[in-house]
Each structure stands twice: as structure tokens, then as C-alpha cells.
């Protein structure tokens, strides 16, 4: 718990009191995340390397004898939503933010945990729709609250899988497991190596400050809201390539076998998608090695190569993301790339600490020249995963 976490903790308690009266049984929180590298490969059996940031979603909760789910969010002022617990079902999804909450309760029910009535108040310091995974933070904080409050605690990795199922099957977003696993499993001061094929995880120390580096998160403020169709199409393309190449999952293709595989494929789009998955997976391993060896500066070029691959081969970048990356590199960043699903959202830039100001000014200036909204920039602390706060 840091000083910065105290304010949202007070906010969520006050919100709970105002909406439902009295005190919540407890407060739980889960973080937003930055994926250092390993983008768009969590649904192709690839490896990813996220870390949790010190922006969190807080949920104050209490059981209630009426079989109703009542929920408010500081980010949705004036909305006081009540859903009969019996109607918590994907067929009744409302296509709004409360689906993330109801989806978690539905996922829990599939494990035999029936909460019945529940009152929930939410607040968050994770920017929404910025590619920092406010959705998984919300799911996992609600999930932790649900598990504890019903006296059926579950291991955090299982919580992540339930949250993925809520997002896939209730909200209807076909995401991989990266965001939820990061929200549940990350540790302070570490990036989480997660092999999505085997489920293997490892905590890799990651401390840019010790190397006089800073990792900037530049939110371009260009929303990724309408990217769902493209995301689903990328997934389908990966499935199609897997079939043609007779692979259990696409990232099972080794870099050594890539040239032969590419010759087998007669479609240029398919070829480029496959090349991204295989080279990106290799870059994750190279990044882990660099971190383990304390060669943090060597991570820079890997980030930039990842961006180029996402831009040209996977085609999930946007003019805003490209401008932020190019400008950051021109102003002294060691490497930069889009992070998250792309089409908008955030860029990360690894910069020497003494160049951070220059990089931020340069990006803001170039955005102003285009008449685009000024990016907001954070230098996150590398924080811990889901937890109970009170
Ligand atoms: P990202 O996960 O990158 O922030 P998503 O589109 O996956 O973007 O998820 C954003 C959605 O999650 C929001 O549109 C909203 O429905 C829901 N959400 C996230 N945080 C909150 C919150 N604090 N209060 C209400 N809804 C939230
Ligand atoms: Mg999300």
C-alpha cells in the first residue's frame, strides 16, 4: 500500500457508503498492466512479459440477503445498476460496463460458488481504453472480492482464468490470458514471464531506475474502442495458419523453421502474420535474457523491432502510435513500441532518465502540430498483482 493508493481507497469506501449505507466487508484491488513485449501472441501460444503498474481498480464489497447484484462506479457517476442474480447470464449481457462485473459472478457460478446478493462499489486509477487493461483490473478486483467474501478463496492463477472466461464468454471480447494473468500474478519490481502454451511462469527482476533508465507510458488518447473486429480477425488468421502448417499453436513454430513455413504459405497477409508471431516470441526470450544479464539497454532495440513488426507485419498500429514511437526514438529513447492490442492506446518508451523530459516534450509537440490531443505520460512503478486492501 502506498500513499497514492490511500486516496482511491477512501473514495471507494465513501462511494460504497453513499450508495448502499454502512461499511463494506472489505476492499480488494487489481492493477493495470503494461506488456513489456510479446504482443498479440498470447492467443497463439506465445510467451509474454507484462508487469503490473501502480494504477489500480478498487472494489468495496458486501454480501446482501436479497438476490440482487447492485453496483456503482466512480467512473460512471449517477449510474446505480441493479441486476437480479438469477439473470446473471451471457444471454442477458447488456453490452455495458456492468457486464465485466456480472461476467465474473457468472464465471464463479460455473465453479460452484453462488454469491447471491452482492453490493459493489468501484473506483479506478487505471485509464480506461488506454491499452493498460482497465477491463482485467476490474474483473480481477471483482473476482478477488467475490472469492473472499463468499469464503471460497481461489489461487490467483485460477482467478485469472475465470476473468478471461468472463471477458470471452460474457462481455464477448475474444482476448487471450495476458491481461488477467498480469493482474493476478505480477509482483512488485518484477516482470512476469508467462508461457501461454505451457502455463509456465517466472518472475524476472525489472528495475529500470537502477540502470538510470525510465520506462515511459505514453497514452496517445486515441481510443482503441473500435478494434474488436480486427482483433478477432487476427485470432482467426492465426488459427488458419496453425491448421495449414499443422501446428498445435502458431508460436510452436521455431525461428529456424520460419523460412520453410513461409514458403508453404501462398498468402502474403498470412505470411506476415505468422512472421510477426514467431519473431515476437523470439524477442520475448531475448528480452528475458537481457534482463537476467542486467543488459537493460539491450531491451530498447527489441522494443523497436516489436513495434515495426506490429506495424508492418501484424498491421495493428495507428498514425498516433507510429508518431509517438518515431518521435520518442528521435528524441533519445533507446526503444519504443505500442503496447496492448494496438489501433490506439499507449506506447512505451525506454529512455535514459536524463532524456525523459526531452522525449515527452518532443512527443507532445509533434502531437500539437497535428492538432491531436496532448498525450498523457506516466512513469509507472512496477507494482503487485491482485490483493486485499482492507
Ligand atoms: P482497456 O482494458 O484497455 O482499458 P477495454 O475496452 O478492454 O480497455 O475495457 C474498458 C472497459 O472496461 C470500459 O469501457 C468499461 O466498460 C470497463 N471498465 C473498466 N474500468 C472501469 C471502471 N472503473 N468503471 C466502470 N467500467 C470500467
Ligand atoms: Mg481490456
Image: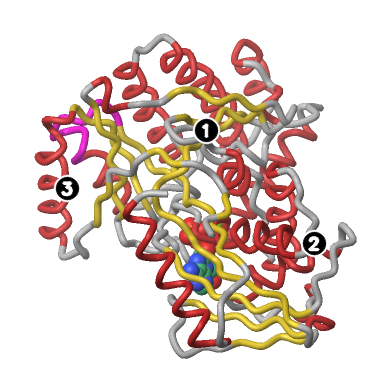
Is 92 a magenta residue?
no
Q: Residue at x 52, y 27 (%)?
A: 280
Q: Residue at x 71, y 50 (%)?
A: 159
Look at mark 3 in the image and give the residue it sits on: 363
Q: Secondary structure at mark 1?
A: loop
Q: In the rendered view, tell whether residue 164 sits above or below residue 350.
A: below
Please give left or right for residue 377 compared with residue 236 in the image. left
The answer to whether residue 325 is visible is yes
Sequence order check, earlier mark of 1 and 3 = 1
Look at mark 2 in the image and give the residue it sits on: 108
Residue 38, label in figure: 1
Q: CA distance from mark 2 to mark 3?
A: 44 Å
Q: Residue at x 44, y 78 (%)?
A: 14
Q: Give residue 223's position: percent from left, percent from top.
A: 39, 64
Q: Residues within 10 Å of mark 2 (few under 14, many from 20)?
A: many
Quarter placement of the C terminus: bottom right
Q: In the rendered view, tell whether residue 6 sits above or below residue 51.
A: below
Farthest-out residue, front: 22
Label 3 CB, ligand 1: below 8 Å? no
Q: Nearest the camera: 216 or 65?
A: 65
Q: CA distance from mark 2 to mark 1?
A: 29 Å
- Range of magenta residues: 327-335
Amino acid at each position: 500500500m502506498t500513499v497514492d493508493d490511500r486516496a482511491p481507497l477512501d473514495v471507494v469506501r465513501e462511494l460504497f457508503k453513499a450508495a448502499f449505507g454502512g461499511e463494506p466487508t472489505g476492499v480488494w484491488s487489481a492493477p493495470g498492466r503494461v506488456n513489456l513485449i510479446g504482443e498479440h501472441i498470447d492467443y497463439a501460444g506465445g510467451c509474454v512479459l507484462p508487469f503490473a503498474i501502480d494504477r489500480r481498480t478498487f472494489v468495496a464489497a458486501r454480501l446482501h440477503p436479497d438476490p440482487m447484484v447492485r453496483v456503482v462506479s466512480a467512473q460512471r457517476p449517477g449510474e446505480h445498476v441493479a441486476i437480479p442474480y438469477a439473470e446473471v447470464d451471457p444471454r442477458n449481457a447488456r453490452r455495458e460496463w456492468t457486464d465485466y462485473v456480472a461476467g465474473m459472478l457468472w464465471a464463479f457460478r460455473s465453479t460452484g460458488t453462488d454469491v447471491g446478493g452482492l453490493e459493489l462499489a468501484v473506483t479506478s486509477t487505471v485509464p480506461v481504453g488506454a491499452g493498460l487493461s482497465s477491463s482485467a483490473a476490474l474483473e480481477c478486483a471483482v473476482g478477488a472480492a467475490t472469492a473472499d467474501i463468499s469464503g471460497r478463496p481461489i489461487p490467483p492463477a485460477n482467478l485469472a482464468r475465470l476473468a478471461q472466461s468472463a471477458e470471452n464468454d460474457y462481455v464477448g471480447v475474444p482476448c487471450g490470458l495476458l491481461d488477467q494473468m498480469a493482474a493476478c500474478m505480477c509482483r512488485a519490481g518484477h516482470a512476469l514471464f508467462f508461457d501461454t502454451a505451457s502455463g509456465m511462469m517466472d518472475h524476472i527482476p525489472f528495475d529500470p531506475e537502477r540502470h538510470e533508465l525510465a520506462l515511459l507510458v505514453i497514452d496517445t488518447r486515441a481510443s482503441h474502442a473500435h478494434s474488436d473486429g480486427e482483433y478477432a480477425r487476427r485470432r482467426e488468421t492465426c488459427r488458419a495458419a496453425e491448421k495449414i502448417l499443422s501446428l498445435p499453436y502458431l508460436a510452436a513454430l521455431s525461428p529456424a523453421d520460419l523460412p520453410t513455413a513461409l514458403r508453404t504459405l501462398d498468402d502474403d497477409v498470412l505470411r506476415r502474420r505468422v512472421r510477426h508471431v514467431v519473431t515476437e516470441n523470439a524477442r520475448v526470450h531475448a528480452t528475458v535474457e537481457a534482463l537476467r544479464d542486467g543488459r537493460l539497454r539491450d531491451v530498447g532495440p527489441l522494443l523497436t523491432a516489436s513495434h515495426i513488426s506490429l506495424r508492418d507485419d501484424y498491421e495493428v498500429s495507428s498514425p498516433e502510435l507510429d508518431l509517438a514511437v518515431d518521435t520518442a526514438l528521435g528524441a533519445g529513447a533507446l526503444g519504443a513500441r505500442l503496447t496492448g492490442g494496438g489501433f490506439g492506446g499507449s506506447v512505451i518508451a525506454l529512455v535514459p532518465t536524463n532524456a525523459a523530459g526531452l522525449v515527452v516534450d518532443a512527443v507532445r509537440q509533434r502531437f500539437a502540430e497535428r492538432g491531436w490531443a496532448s498525450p498523457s505520460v506516466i512513469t509507472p512503478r512496477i507494482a503487485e498483482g491482485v490483493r486485499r486492501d482492507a
